[in-house]
Image (tube, coloured by chain):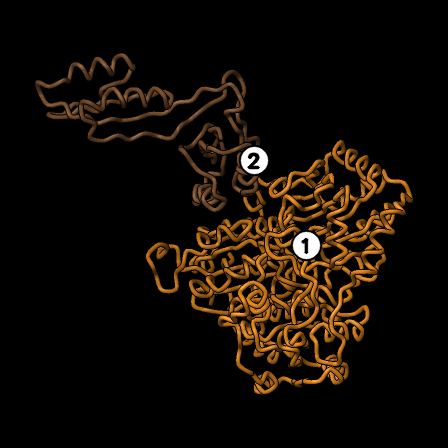
Chain colours: A brown, B orange
């Protein structure tokens, strides 16, 4: 059971996300994370899905995705050299006179940014792989995390390889 | 300028559609108004489920795409079972539904249902037309998707304002299909084909396991040619019946849960399983680890996702059965006998035939045997689901593909009778016979109204045992005879048919069966024959669910007779 990162190019049409996620629940595949947005090509969206499963399940995920009419291309990006990132926003309790400076130091070490300062709170933005986000979450939790939100993972192949939709 | 409804009808004609099964309603009024003087025939059914089953039956009998039409909300929802039936058996159907106007979408408007959302898991693809200018392209895409690759049902949902919108009728590039993500693969990989040929030529005990894919790809002739060259026995799934004539010496009939003993033994002892257009369904394989345990497996399928889904093949071939078989035939010598294997298979066939008590009582198998004798090479047999279906599969003598129409994957009771209407319109010169149970027939019995109205000459033979027979059989064998809610009261089908103005008769003695069938077939219109069969007859052989297919229950006595 290993995690795989699928990059799925799809027609940018209503309902396409529902087709993809419906397929996962119907066939009993587990989505760990999902990110979707427009990509460099017109009328095309790119969905990045992280799935855990054995080799057989991963093979089926790929084949079943390919059967969807609005799926243009499916690539298991974890088979290649790749870069991957997630983003998290963390809202912390930070009353005046408390540990604000410590929090800001930790953020600095992680090259995270403070993107909102309130009377009693701070919002930290951090990007990185899952490990980095888990680490900063761990370090910040003693200060009191009020809210945390993170995106699904996104990934690209290294070097000149691309997931080209073709036309 | 043309209306959306006009563009729809013209689009259907462009696809060669000559018949639609449908049921009108509020939001499809503009489409029905257009149909009023169109030269497409419309058959008014009594329930939308029957419309889609009829379109499906038409597709199975003809090989062309069947079309049905229903209104929004309840009308559309009534298509769901039929879509799922067609989806499981890969049948090309285009279902058109009306929808509330786009301005009301999502408002829980009167007769609104999210039919594209509801049918996503049971269609190959579906469309919600948001703009009349997309309609022409979508119709072309829908028919293309339904009838190519692994075939299947496609639904087009058309809001009322799209049907009524007036738009200029153009045929530019925007109206041509653009399906970047849909490129079915027909040609098999030549290296894999060569590997398959090498395995076949080396095999000592090869066997073919052929399914519905052979019929859908029109590859029956190629299959028989290859089997004859290799002197290789052929077992078929329920969906594959007819791809080789029942009387062909290499035919072993159906395999699996209610397959013949000899097919199941041969599969179990084979050293090469040549699988064509099949899914390794649990009703076929039984315990999958023990299925063809000594065999290398070649698997041809047009759907890459079927390969390795249930059983990993040694040689996977993604492609169209016909084109792959043709290529294989060109690489295989004229004759390649396996005398020892043939002899072994022959002895199983001789020593373990299908059988039933021929004691003069009215056994359902006897009715089917007689029907086969009377029809000879003619006829299309449409079954319902349950014991009637299994007896028909076992005892009818099929001579050609598309002669057998039955809901395989989904096992939809109530499928057969409406599907038979479609089969008649596909093949108006063939006698169409429905083999039904009293349970199944009552699931869509309202279609007596349709066959009466259009004088559709289908013959319904009800193997009436006043039980939900297949469930009763399981209760008898696996639930200690506890017949929980499977007994049905007596129904006078003859009188019901007559109330619709349909000729009918009731048979209670085996000696009257032949004459009654002949009378039904000779009658020019629809006919209902209520045959009161032995009530507790069982379907044997039977592999209990999840067991090894070589371990069959073969008893052929009915419970009643054992006492």
* Picture coordinates of residue B342, whole percent (x, y): 86, 50
Total residue callouts: 2
The residue lying at 64 percent from left, 61 percent from top is B17
Relative to B562, does residue A76 appear above or below in the rendering?
above
Vertical relation: B164 (above or below) B364: above
Q: Quadrant of the C terminus of chain B?
A: bottom right
Q: To which chain does the residue with label 2 belong? A: A
State the separation of the CA atoms marked 2 and 1: 29 Å
Marking on residue B551: 1
x, y (%) of residue B160? 43, 60
Residue at the spot 77% in from the left edge and 50% down from the top edge? B266
Q: Tag 1's secondary structure?
A: loop
Q: Nearer the viewer, residue B86 or A12?
A: B86
Which quarter of the figure has residue B335?
A: top right
Give the image location of residue A143, x and y in percent: 18, 22
Tell me where residue B165 sits by quadrant.
bottom left
In percent of width and height, residue B309 lies at 60, 42
Query: Left or right: A60 with respect to B314?
Result: left
- Residue B21 in view: no
Classify B507 as above or below B62: below
Q: Which residue is mark 2?
A: A56
């Amino acid at each position: 059971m290993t995690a795989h990162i699928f990059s799925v190019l799809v027609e940018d049409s209503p309902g396409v996300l529902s087709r993809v996620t419906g397929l996962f629940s119907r066939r009993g595949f587990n989505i760990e994370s999902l990110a979707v947005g427009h990509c460099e090509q017109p009328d095309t969206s790119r969905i990045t899905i992280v799935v855990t499963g054995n080799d057989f399940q991963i093979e089926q995920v790929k084949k079943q995705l390919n059967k969807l009419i609005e799926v243009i291309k499916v690539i298991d990006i974890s088979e290649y050299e790749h870069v991957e990132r997630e983003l998290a926003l963390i809202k912390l309790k930070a009353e005046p006179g408390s540990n604000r400076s410590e929090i800001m130091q930790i953020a600095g070490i992680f090259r995270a940014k403070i993107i909102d300062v309130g009377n009693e709170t701070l919002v930290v933005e951090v990007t990185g792989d899952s490990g980095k986000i888990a680490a900063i979450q761990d370090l910040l939790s003693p200060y009191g995390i009020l809210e945390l939100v993170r995106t699904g993972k996104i990934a690209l192949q290294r070097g000149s390889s691309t997931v080209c939709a073709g036309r | 300028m043309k209306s959306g409804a006009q563009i729809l009808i013209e689009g259907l004609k462009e696809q060669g559609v000559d018949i639609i099964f449908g049921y009108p309603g509020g939001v499809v009024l503009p489409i029905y108004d257009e149909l009023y003087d169109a030269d497409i025939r419309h058959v008014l059914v009594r329930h939308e489920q029957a419309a889609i089953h009829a379109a499906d039956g038409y597709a199975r009998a003809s090989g062309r795409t069947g079309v049905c039409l229903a209104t929004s909300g309840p009308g559309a929802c009534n298509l769901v079972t039929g879509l799922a039936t067609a989806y499981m058996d890969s049948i090309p159907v285009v279902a058109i539904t009306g929808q509330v106007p786009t301005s009301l979408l999502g408002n829980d408007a009167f007769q609104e249902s999210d039919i594209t959302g509801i049918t996503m898991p049971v269609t190959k693809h579906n469309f919600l037309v948001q703009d009349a200018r997309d309609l022409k392209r979508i119709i072309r895409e829908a028919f293309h998707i339904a009838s190519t690759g692994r075939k299947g049902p496609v639904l087009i949902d058309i809001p009322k304002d799209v049907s009524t919108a007036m738009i200029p009728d153009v045929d530019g590039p925007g109206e041509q299909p653009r399906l970047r993500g849909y490129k079915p693969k027909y040609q098999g990989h030549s290296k894999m084909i060569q590997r398959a040929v090498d395995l076949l030529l080396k095999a000592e005990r090869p066997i073919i396991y052929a399914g519905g894919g052979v019929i859908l790809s029109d590859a029956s002739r190629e299959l028989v040619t290859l089997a004859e060259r290799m002197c290789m026995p052929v077992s078929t799934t329920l969906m594959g019946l007819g791809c080789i004539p029942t009387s062909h010496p290499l035919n072993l009939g159906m395999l699996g849960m209610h397959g013949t003993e000899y097919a199941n033994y041969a599969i179990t002892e084979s050293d090469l399983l040549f699988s064509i257009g099949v899914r390794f369904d649990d009703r076929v394989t039984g315990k999958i680890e023990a299925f063809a345990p000594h065999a290398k497996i070649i698997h041809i399928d047009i759907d890459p996702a079927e390969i390795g889904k249930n059983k990993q093949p040694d040689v996977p071939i993604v492609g169209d059965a016909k084109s792959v078989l043709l290529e294989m035939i060109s690489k295989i010598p004229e004759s390649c006998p396996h005398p020892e294997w043939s002899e072994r298979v022959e002895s199983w066939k001789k020593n373990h035939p299908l059988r039933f008590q021929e004691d003069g009582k009215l056994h359902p198998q006897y009715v089917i045997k007689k029907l086969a004798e009377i029809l000879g090479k003619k006829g299309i047999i449409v079954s319902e689901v349950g014991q009637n279906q299994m007896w028909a599969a076992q005892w009818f003598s099929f001579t050609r593909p598309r002669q057998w129409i039955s809901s395989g994957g989904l096992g939809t009771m109530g499928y057969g009778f409406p599907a038979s209407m479609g089969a008649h319109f596909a093949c108006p010169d063939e006698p169409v016979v429905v083999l039904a149970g009293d349970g199944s027939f009552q699931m869509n019995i309202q279609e007596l109204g349709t066959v009466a109205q259009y004088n559709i000459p289908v013959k319904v033979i009800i193997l009436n045992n006043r039980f939900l027979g297949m469930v009763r059989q399981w209760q008898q064998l696996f639930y200690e005879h506890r017949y929980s809610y499977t007994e049905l009261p007596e129904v006078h089908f003859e009188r019901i048919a007559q109330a619709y103005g349909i000729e009918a008769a009731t048979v209670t003695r085996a000696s009257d069966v032949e004459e009654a069938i002949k009378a039904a077939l000779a009658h020019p219109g629809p006919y209902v024959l209520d045959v009161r069969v032995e009530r507790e007859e069982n379907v044997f052989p039977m592999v209990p669910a999840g067991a090894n297919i070589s371990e069959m229950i073969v008893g052929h006595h009915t419970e009643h007779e054992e006492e």
